[in-house]
Amino acid sequence: MSIKNLPTRCIRTFDSHEGPVHIALYNSSGEYLLSGGQDKKVCLWNPETGLRIKTYTGHGKEVLDISVTIDHTRFVSCGGDRQVYYWDVATGRTIRRFEGHNQRVNTVDFNMEGTVIASGSYDTTIRLWDCRSQSRIPIQILEEAKDSITSLQISQYEIVSGCTDGNIRTHDIRMGTLLTDLISYPVTSVTVSNDFNCILTSSLDSVIRLMDRENGGMLNSFKGHNNSSYKIHSCLSRDDAYVISGSENGAIYIWDLLEGKVLTTISNAHSGVVTCVKYHPRIDAMVSTSIDGVIKLWKPANDEVSQ
C-alpha cells in the first residue's frame, strides 16, 4: 500500500445513533458494518450505500463492544447492563443471553470457530462461554487482573487482554499458562497483528505501543495523538503496515509501523473524541466512531466512489 492509498477522505456518514457511538466494525468480508452506542442499540449497515439494514434492541444500557463470527451469521454484544447478548444476524433474534458478570461488560470476542465467547468486565474477570451448550454457567473464569478488563482478543489458542492495572495478559488456554507484560499505564485497547507476531496496545499516557507477542519486548511506539481519559480502539491496516488511532481532539492519526512516524493526520475528523477506528479487511477503507454520535466511512483521496 502506498501513502496515496491511505483512507483519508470521508465519503459517507451514518448518523442513526442517538448519542455517543462506542464501537463499529466490519464483518470478515467487509460487506457490512455493525455499530453500537450509548442509545442501547446495535445497527447493521451496508457501508457502500449507507443503508441501515437492521436495528437490534434488547440491551438495557449502552453497548460497548461487538464481535462477529467468521461466517457472518452471528454476533455478540456487551455493555453497561452486565450481560452478553448472542444474536442471529439475519433474524435479529437473541439466541442467548449470558449472565454472570456483576459490573459492566467492556469487551467481547469470538474464537475462530465461533463456538466460544470471551467477555471482559469492570468486575476484573474474563469469562468464557460455550455457544453450543444450553448452560448459562461460564466454562472458565480468569481472575488474575487487578482492575477493569478494557479490551480482549482471542487469537488462535490465546486470549490477549488489556487492563486498567497497566498490564497486558496473554492466557494460553491450551497450555494453561499466563504471560504478563507491564505497560505501567491503563491499557484501553489490544489488537493482535494479522501475522500473529505482535500486539498493538493503546494506553492512557497518549502512547500506542507495538509489543513482541513472544517475549513482551516493545518494538516501537507511536505518539502525537491525545489519549489520557477515554477508551479509544486503535487498529492496524489490513497489511500491518500502518497504525491508526483516533484522538481526544477529534483527529485521526496514521503512523508508519516500522518507522513510528506520523504519516498523516485527519484534523477535525469528528467534532468530539474519536472512540474507535477499524480497518476494512480487504480494501483500503476504514470506519470511525465518536462521542459526537456520527460514524464515518473513509477511503483514499483518489478513490472515485460516488457519495
Image (tube, rainbow, N blue to C red):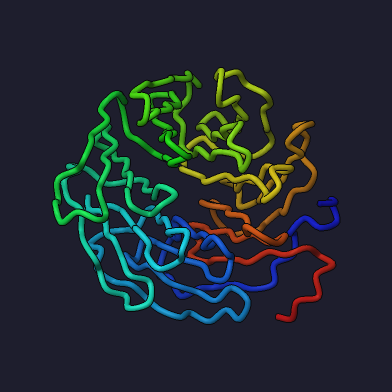
**218 w.r.t. 78: above or below:** above
* Nearer to me, 136 or 167: 136
The quarter holding residue 282 reads: bottom right
Coordinates of residue 36 in the picture (x, y in percent)? 41, 62
**234 w.r.t. 72: above or below:** above
Coordinates of residue 210 in the picture (x, y in percent)? 62, 30
**83 w.r.t. 236: above or below:** below
User: Which residue does the image show at 69% across and 43% down from the upper left?
Assistant: 240
The quarter holding residue 171 reads: top left
**166 w.r.t. 116: above or below:** above
In the image: residue 73, left or right of residue 27: left
Instruction: Report the number of discs.
Output: 0
User: Which residue does the image show at 22% across and 50% down from the upper left?
Assistant: 82
Coordinates of residue 228 in the picture (x, y in percent)? 51, 35
User: Which residue does the image show at 29% across and 61% down from the upper left?
Assistant: 86
* Nearer to me, 279 or 112: 112
Coordinates of residue 132 in the picture (x, y in percent)? 24, 56
User: Which residue does the image show at 33% across and 70% down from the upper left?
Assistant: 88
* Quadrant of the image containing the C terminus: bottom right
